[in-house]
Image (spheres, rainbow, N blue to C red):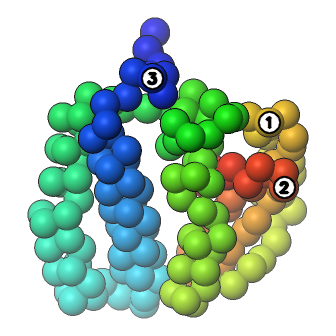
């Protein structure tokens, strides 16, 4: 059974390490989407991804592990919803609106897939509300999110 860290048990350096890992996850997602969204394999994007992994992603992952916590979710100790014990991303840690704006700048646009919407429609937030479906597409890349309309916790499926 996996032990869940409580906000009181988190070392102070963990919040900085968590934010660094979130930034890395977002950038890796954008680089992978850029690589896969093209018609071929771009050596330029692969070189950028390789450099990013060596200089940013691996050091961030090591710092995160050294800080002593691998959470179930991406929560925040400031959150009253105890999202640190879920698979939801906390709006105190990473705003969905910021992610959506970044995806739009990368060429994504809102879209609807009724099968994905039905799957998201049955998921509950830490506040007890159902998550709302948000889909985004760019070329063959399709991203699916569940976002709470009340407290704005979110997850990517």
Residue 102 at x, y percent in the picture: 54, 80
From this viewpoint, which residue is outermost toward the top? 1
Residue depicted at 43% across the width and 14% down the height: 3
Q: Which residue is mark 1?
A: 127
Q: Quadrant of residue 96?
A: bottom right
Marks 2/3: CA–CA distance: 28 Å
Rendered position, 132 above or below 40: above
Residue placed most toward the observer, 149 or 156: 149
- Where disc 3 sits, the SS reads helix
- State left or right for residue 151 relative to residue 75: right
Q: Which residue is mark 3?
A: 8
Marks 2/1: CA–CA distance: 10 Å
Q: Residues within 10 Å of mark 3 (few under 14, many from 20)?
A: few
Q: Residues within 10 Å of mark 2 (few under 14, many from 20)?
A: some
- State left or right for residue 84 relative to residue 53: right
Marks 3/1: CA–CA distance: 21 Å
- State left or right for residue 124 relative to residue 37: right
- State left or right for residue 103 relative to residue 67: right
Residue depicted at 81% across the width and 67% down the height: 113
Residue placed most toward the observer, 81 or 32: 81
Residue depicted at 15% across the width and 54% down the height: 59
- Which numbered dot is residue 149? 2
Nearest to viewer (mark 3 / mark 1)? 3
Q: Are marks 2 and 3 in contact (CB under 8 Å)?
A: no
Count of number-bearing discs: 3
Residue 18 at x, y percent in the picture: 37, 47
Residue placed most toward the observer, 8 or 126: 8
Q: Quadrant of residue 15?
A: top left
Q: Mark 3 or mark 1: which comes first in sequence?
A: 3
């Amino acid at each position: 059974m996996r032990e869940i860290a409580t906000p009181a048990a988190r070392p102070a350096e963990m919040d900085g390490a968590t934010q660094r890992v979130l930034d890395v996850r977002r950038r890796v997602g954008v680089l992978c989407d850029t690589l896969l969204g093209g018609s071929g394999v771009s050596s330029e994007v692969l070189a950028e991804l390789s450099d990013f992994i060596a200089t940013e992603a691996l050091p961030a992952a090591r710092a995160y592990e050294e800080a002593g916590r691998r959470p179930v979710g991406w929560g925040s100790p400031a959150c009253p919803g105890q999202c640190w014990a879920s698979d939801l991303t906390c709006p105190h840690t990473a705003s969905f609106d910021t992610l959506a704006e970044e995806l739009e700048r990368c060429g994504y646009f809102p879209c609807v897939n009724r099968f994905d919407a039905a799957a998201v429609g049955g998921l509950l937030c830490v506040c007890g509300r159902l998550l709302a479906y948000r889909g985004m597409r760019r070329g063959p890349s399709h991203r699916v999110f569940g976002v709470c309309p009340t407290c704005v916790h979110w997850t990517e499926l």
